[in-house]
Image: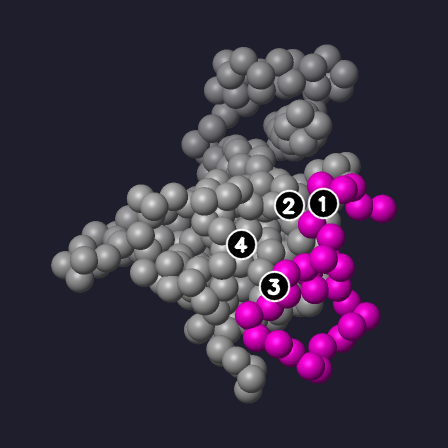
Amino acid sequence: MLASYASNPDNSKGRLHLEKDVLHILSPFEIDRARIIESTAFRRLEYKTQVFVNHEGDHYRNRLTHSLEATEIAKIISKALRISSDLAESLTLAHDLGHAPFGHAGEDALSEAMQEFGADFSHNIHTLTLVTELESRHPQFEGLNLSWEMIDGIEKHNGPIMNKYESPTLLAYAKRYNLELDKFSSLEAQISSLADDIAYNNHDIDDGFRAGLISIEDLKNIDIFGSIIRQVTTEYNNLEDHVLLHEAITRMKNMMIKS
């Protein structure tokens, strides 16, 4: 049973475009999840950089696998708090759809290239453009026609957007479908943002170790992580480094989730 502070799908604010032929056996947030997973933008995440570019090895995370790992964390926290895990899952699956290739470096390069046109590139705004315009496959409307709670969470998962933020794309959409830009988004959206941080703070260590950029000795010198490594080595003797690291990362991740 959902808590009183959860985003209840039965009380969703609906979609910008009214739809008649929908599967009512699914909640609005489950429908959102299906549309995100089936989108072209979601599939393209496979070749978008997390830290290491695609051709450097197929064991490194990319934006797609990162999104999946973050989603699992969001679901766990949502269930613990008795909020909508369907909404948190859908938001986390969608949170990186608008990212440029080559991660934040690609975003910076695109912003620089767009300066002569008096614009910037923001992956959050590009996500909005994707799900409201470019993912056009339905005859009744442009985009995916996601629920209000999804659009709200995609744009405001990092907090309210005040007047200083003047994206024409966002402001135009907010006028059509009031996103209450000066208010915080749902708890599910905030959990999605935290799950993103927990996921990359842990799996980037694993990828760095795999690439030879980080050693176990390096990690022993980090206060919290070092104490976890010493704890694992006390409990288990003669572990191979990759097994030791996996166990330490699992414990670190669990500690962050519980916190």
First of labels 3, 1 by sequence position: 1
Residue 6, numbered label: 1
Disc 3 element: loop
Disc 4 element: helix
As measured in the structure, the alpha-carbon distance from the residue carrying label 2 to the one carrying label 1 is 8 Å
Type of amino acid at the residue the image marks with label 2: Glu
Residue 152, numbered label: 4
Out of 151 and 131, give the one closest to the viewer.
151
Residue 147, numbered label: 3
> What's the magenta region?
1-29
Type of amino acid at the residue the image marks with label 4: Asp
Q: Which residue is mark 2?
A: 188
Q: Are marks 2 and 1 in contact (CB under 8 Å)?
A: yes
Type of amino acid at the residue the image marks with label 3: Ser
Residue 144 covered by magenta stretch: no
Q: Is residue 144 above or below residue 186?
A: below
In this image, 108 relative to 207: left or right? left
First of labels 2, 3 by sequence position: 3
Name the spot of residue 249 as percent of width and height, x first.
63, 30
Q: Are marks 3 and 1 in contact (CB under 8 Å)?
A: no
Query: Splitting the image into 4 quarters, where does residue 80 fall?
Result: top right
* 2 vs 4, front mark: 4
Disc 1 element: loop
